Image (cartoon, grey):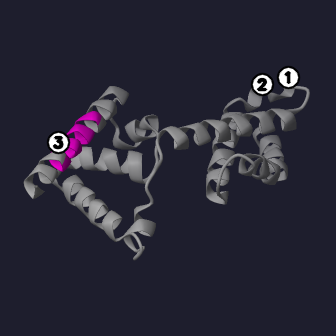
């Protein structure tokens, strides 16, 4: 499949792929992200797509797998929407916890702050973080682990100080 043929294919099938992803994911943004990722994967294999009986079916399978992986990731690592929770008046106790967490994060070394925010607030995968931060994957894991440990220790310390 040529690049131009792929562009036409992507334009014609993108909406179907978004709807396929939307069956599994909670919002349109996540479905759009899954579709983008699926299109990137398909683009990378565009030269071998002519060997498939139905590229449309392949596209739906790829986007479904990506959506399911994203769903599993969300279930294993639920993310906290700070913008929603910080402005929610009904969560008075939660607002204090979030404020404490943000203050603790601000005390971390800048590299750990950056990695932690990309992972848990922006929801990026470690591979993406490594690419963006121009670091090895092991360095990302190590900094993420250190940041989490530091936050846990500081949370425990502040809880002990309050009692």
Q: Which residues are magenta?
A: 145-155
Per the image, label 2 sits on a secondary structure element best described as: helix
Percent x, y for residue 149? 22, 38
Q: Left or right of 154: which side holds 142? A: right
Q: Which residue is mark 2?
A: 48
Q: Disc 1 vs disc 2: Cβ atoms closer than 8 Å?
A: yes
Q: Which residue is mark 3?
A: 153
Distance from disc 2 to disc 3, alpha carbons, whole Å, reads: 51 Å
Task: Choose between 102 and 111: the one closer to the eye.
Answer: 102
Above/below status of 66 relative to 103: above
Task: Choose between 1 and 9: the one closer to the eye.
Answer: 9
- Residue 109 visible to the viewer: no
Which quarter of the rendered picture does the N terminus lie within? Answer: top right
Percent x, y for residue 36? 65, 47
Above/below status of 130 relative to 106: above
Per the image, label 3 sits on a secondary structure element best described as: helix
Q: Residues within 10 Å of mark 3 (few under 14, many from 20)?
A: few
Q: Which residue is mark 1?
A: 51
Percent x, y for residue 13? 83, 48
Residue ID at (28%, 34%): 145
Q: Main secondary structure of the magenta part?
A: helix
């Amino acid at each position: 499949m040529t690049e131009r043929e792929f562009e036409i294919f992507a334009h014609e099938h993108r909406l179907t792929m978004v709807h396929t992803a939307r069956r599994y994911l909670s919002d349109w943004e996540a479905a759009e992200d899954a579709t983008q990722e699926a299109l990137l994967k398909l683009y990378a294999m565009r030269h071998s797509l002519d060997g498939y009986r139905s590229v449309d079916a392949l596209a739906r399978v790829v986007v479904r797998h990506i959506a399911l992986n994203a769903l599993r990731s969300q279930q294993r690592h639920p993310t906290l929407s700070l913008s929603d929770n910080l402005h929610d008046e009904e969560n008075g106790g939660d607002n204090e916890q979030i404020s404490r967490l943000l203050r603790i994060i601000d005390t971390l070394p800048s590299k750990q702050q950056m990695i932690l925010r990309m992972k848990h607030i922006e929801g990026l995968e470690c591979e993406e973080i490594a690419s963006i931060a121009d670091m090895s994957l092991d360095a990302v894991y190590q900094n993420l682990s250190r940041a989490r440990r530091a936050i846990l220790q500081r949370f425990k310390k502040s809880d002990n100080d309050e009692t």
